[in-house]
Image: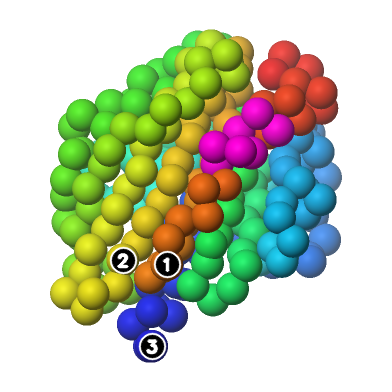
Amino acid sequence: MRMVHRLAAVAAAVAVTGSPATAAHAQAAEDLRPALLTPADLPEGFVPVAAATNDDGAVTIGGNFPGCPSLDPVTGDGTTAAAVTYSKGAVGPYLTDALVHFPAGGAVTAMDRLTAAVTTCKSFSQELAGITVRFTLTPAQVPATLGEKAFGVRMTGDTDFGIAVTADIVAIRRGDFVLWLNDMTVGTTGAGLVGTLAKTAADRCAQQVKGC
């Protein structure tokens, strides 16, 4: 059980780190938080467990995966971002919704790099919470109508302890914005949330943020 909780802690932090969701946020010059999914958009039982903006934390799109450079974080100088993670229990599912605004043209480069992961990182291994996880990436279908470019991928991780780590990921480019949804579970079957919430997230961005 200790191994499960160590992996669960990693799962919760893969796509967003920062202050607790209940803490007060500094007001950013460009506040992208209104474009993120809210508890009302999710099935019953999900609660916010982490949130970050450029002002109070580190928003990571991609993840800390040295074995797959294509999944390296795409946020950096010149980007504005916000993210929130919801959980339905210690082993998940964890649902992360993030939005990044890039300088002109930067979103195209970021999406090209993320999309390349499906071909350049079909399989790789790395340490997570002191445990070796062997990941396999397989493409997933995403409606092309959600943005100028959209892609999906399933990451399936196996361990020597028989504990599976599964993440369903969707990324969507809309103009100079990239939306990122990550549904991660530990030792259980994925909740299948990203497929049903992708359109909701895209519509929310279009309604709340100019240019999205």
Of residues 152 and 180, the one nearer the viewer is 152
Q: CA distance from mark 2 to mark 1?
A: 7 Å
Q: Residues within 10 Å of mark 1 (few under 14, many from 20)?
A: some
Q: Pick the residue in front: 32 or 182.
A: 182
| Mark 2 lies on residue | 164
Which mark is first along the chain, 3 or 2? Answer: 3
Q: Which residues are magenta?
A: 194-200
Lower position in the chain sequence, tag 3 or tag 1: 3
Say whether marks 3 and 1 touch (CB < 8 Å). no
Q: From the viewer's perspective, is 169 left or right of 54?
A: left
Amino acid type at circle 3 is Met
Q: Work out whether residue 41 can be spotted.
A: yes
Pointer 3: what residue? 1
Q: CA distance from mark 2 to mark 3?
A: 13 Å
Horizontal and vertical percent for residue 82?
Answer: 66, 42
Q: Residue at x 36, y 20 (%)?
A: 112
Which of marks 1 and 2 precedes in the sequence?
Answer: 2
- Marks 2/3 in contact by CB < 8 Å: the verdict is no
Q: Which mark is residue 188?
A: 1
